[in-house]
Image: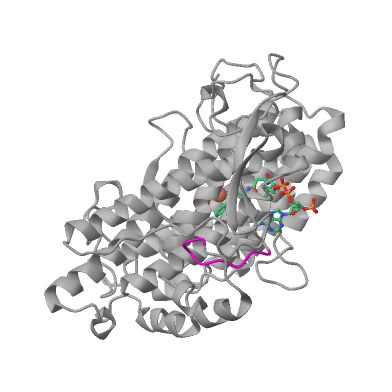
């Protein structure tokens, strides 16, 4: 199978679009509507500037990252599926061992469409949330990273729209239209999932979002990459290669904010780093508490018949399904989950099939903790006695078992009056957000970096730190 992307067409692709005139026409009809959305709801600045962007020119290991200066509207949003890996068997659920599906089985149209629409909806939502950030970019490299994330999230929208149009007929075309009509934070036509209606008003929020919320993307995509519906599986596999960079932007971004705080603490021998225009570690902790809890909600309820059905039908698997050592059907297995109990919380065993969402959230939390450990190393290396922690999983939740629990980040149950009195220690206050906003100034000289964030250690694609990542 050829992995080369056909670039002489309007829509670069490795799905042989040219041979499917109907689909090609549907996508070409959607294209101008997408461009209208991009121009109105996409990056609010510098659409006419040349940005040092990575573009996929083929899907194999060497060719998918091609770097060049391009204007964002000229970015080639394409449709790419990972190459077939030879293993063409379904590896979990009732259909385990059968051949993967090239088309959607009629009886599974509803749930599959719903999964694809939910996934697709998050992609343009995040672009909308990040729309104004370039105006306060702390450096040209950060601005370039923002734009890279934005064009790729828009490409992820293309990926889901392709599946809808290629496999869901008229319904799919209607869903594709609606993906351009919902808006992040709009009370009348909001985006589907909670976190995607929150604001991303400053760069600390952006780094936290790409660390915590894009990481939900990693885990959801990895589960969909197991799907028996082969086009979905291979689309998601390719999306995961792009996702890694988004999380890198988040992890290194937060690390740089921490680094600056530590540098100031050491040099000025004070904890009051705000006097010197840095963001203090306790405020960073509050942002962690907020973004982690909001992102945890994206995994759905702990006990979910939706999730059990998705698994049993073979639509959505677990993280790295093939590596797990069980029967991949979970008929008699149990899995331990945390439950609200009289005096606090307790672990109980439940049928594994019913708590698929919670299991994926566990995998996610373990991954988040690894990143937090790396941040703590930055603090420890500076000789500072402070540790960032992930809040308790019941803290500040809106979905599932813990949505009516009030507890501290340590997991101590509290009453409403204590919550009201103390919450300003746990979540960013309006004053915290105001302070962070006050630091946001644009730096647009190559090599210039804002004072609240340390410069990165390395550039993008081995370029220097003062490379013109965006040509002003
Ligand atoms: N907000 O049975 P449950 C990404 C609803 S991020 C609002 O637990 P299920 C990205 C739920 O819809 C990855 N509503 O649900 C990152 C259901 O509604 P109904 C996005 C919520 O289906 C950064 C009800 O509550 N991909 O790619 O097991 C930048 C009962 O819930 C929420 C996916 O999400 C919520 N947080 O699990 C850019 C993958 N949670 O039936 C991009 C596809 C639940 O009562 N989606 N509800 O009307 C799914 O797999 C599932 O829909 C979910 C929910 C895991 C999200
Ligand atoms: Fe995405
Ligand atoms: Fe992403």
Q: Residue at x 45, y 79 (%)?
A: 433
Q: Nearer the viewer, residue 39 or 212?
A: 212
Q: Is residue 112 above or below residue 327?
A: below
What colouring does the structure picture have?
A: one colour
Location of residue 446 in the rendering, given as x and y in whole percent from the top left corner? 25, 67
Location of residue 332 (image quadrant): top right
Quarter of image, res 321: top right
Question: Which span is picked out in magenta?
Answer: 404-411
Residue at image x 72%, y 56%? Answer: 179
Q: Is residue 134 visible?
A: yes
Asked if residue 370 is positioned above or below residue 230 in the image, the reply reads below
Q: Above or below — where is 146 with respect to 275?
A: above
Residue occupying image coordinates x 18% and y 69%: 263
Q: Quadrant of residue 39?
A: bottom right
Q: Is residue 251 left or right of residue 178?
A: left
Most prominent secondary structure in the magenta stretch? loop
Does the image show residue 52? no
Q: Where the N terminus falls, by quadrant?
A: top right
Q: Is residue 140 above or below residue 416?
A: above
Quadrant the C terminus occupies: bottom left
Residue 50: x and y, percent?
40, 61
Q: Nearer the viewer, residue 394 or 182?
A: 394
């Amino acid at each position: 199978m050829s992995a080369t992307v056909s670039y002489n067409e309007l829509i670069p692709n490795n799905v042989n679009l040219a041979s499917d005139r109907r689909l090609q026409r549907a996508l070409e009809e959607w294209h101008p509507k997408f461009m209208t959305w991009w121009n109105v709801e996409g990056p609010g600045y510098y659409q006419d500037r040349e940005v040092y962007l990575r573009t996929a020119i083929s899907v194999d290991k060497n060719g998918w990252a091609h770097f060049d200066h391009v204007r964002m509207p000229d970015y080639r949003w394409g449709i790419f599926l990972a190459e077939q890996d030879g293993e063409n068997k379904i590896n979990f659920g009732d259909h385990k061992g059968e051949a993967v599906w090239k088309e959607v089985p009629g009886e599974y149209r509803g749930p599959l469409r719903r999964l694809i629409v939910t996934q697709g909806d998050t992609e343009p939502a995040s672009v909308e949330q990040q729309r104004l950030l370039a105006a306060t970019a702390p450096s040209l490299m950060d601005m370039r990273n923002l734009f890279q994330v934005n064009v790729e999230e828009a490409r992820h929208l293309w990926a889901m729209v392709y599946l809808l149009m290629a496999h869901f007929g008229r319904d799919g075309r209607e869903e594709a239209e609606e993906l351009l009509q919902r808006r992040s934070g709009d009370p009348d036509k909001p985006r589907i999932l909670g976190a995607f209606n929150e604001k991303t008003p400053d760069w600390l929020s952006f780094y936290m979002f790409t660390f915590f919320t894009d990481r939900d993307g990693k885990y959801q995509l990895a589960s969909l990459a197991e799907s028996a519906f082969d086009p979905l599986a291979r689309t998601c596999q390719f999306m995961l290669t792009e996702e890694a960079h988004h999380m890198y932007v988040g992890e290194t971004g937060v690390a740089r904010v921490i680094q600056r705080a530590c540098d100031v603490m050491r040099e000025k021998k004070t904890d009051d780093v705000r006097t010197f225009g840095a963001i203090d570690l306790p405020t960073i902790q509050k942002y962690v508490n907020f973004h982690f809890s909001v992102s945890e909600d994206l995994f759905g309820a702990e006990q979910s018949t939706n999730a059990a059905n998705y698994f049993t039908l073979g639509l959505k698997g677990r993280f790295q399904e093939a590596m797990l050592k069980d029967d991949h059907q979970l008929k008699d297995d149990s899995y331990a989950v945390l439950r609200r109990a009289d005096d606090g919380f307790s672990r109980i065993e439940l049928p594994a099939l019913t708590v698929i969402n919670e299991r994926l959230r566990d995998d996610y939390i373990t991954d988040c903790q690894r990143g937090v450990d790396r941040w703590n190393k930055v603090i420890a290396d500076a000789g500072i006695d402070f540790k960032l922690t992930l809040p308790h999983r019941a803290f500040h939740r809106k979905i599932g078992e813990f949505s009516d629990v009030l507890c501290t980040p340590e997991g101590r149950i509290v009453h409403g009056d204590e919550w009201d009195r103390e919450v300003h220690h746990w979540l960013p206050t309006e004053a915290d957000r105001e302070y962070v906003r006050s630091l946001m100034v644009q730096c647009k000289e190559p090599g210039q970096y804002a004072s609240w964030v340390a410069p990165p250690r390395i550039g993008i694609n081995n370029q220097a730190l003062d490379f013109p990542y965006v040509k002003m």
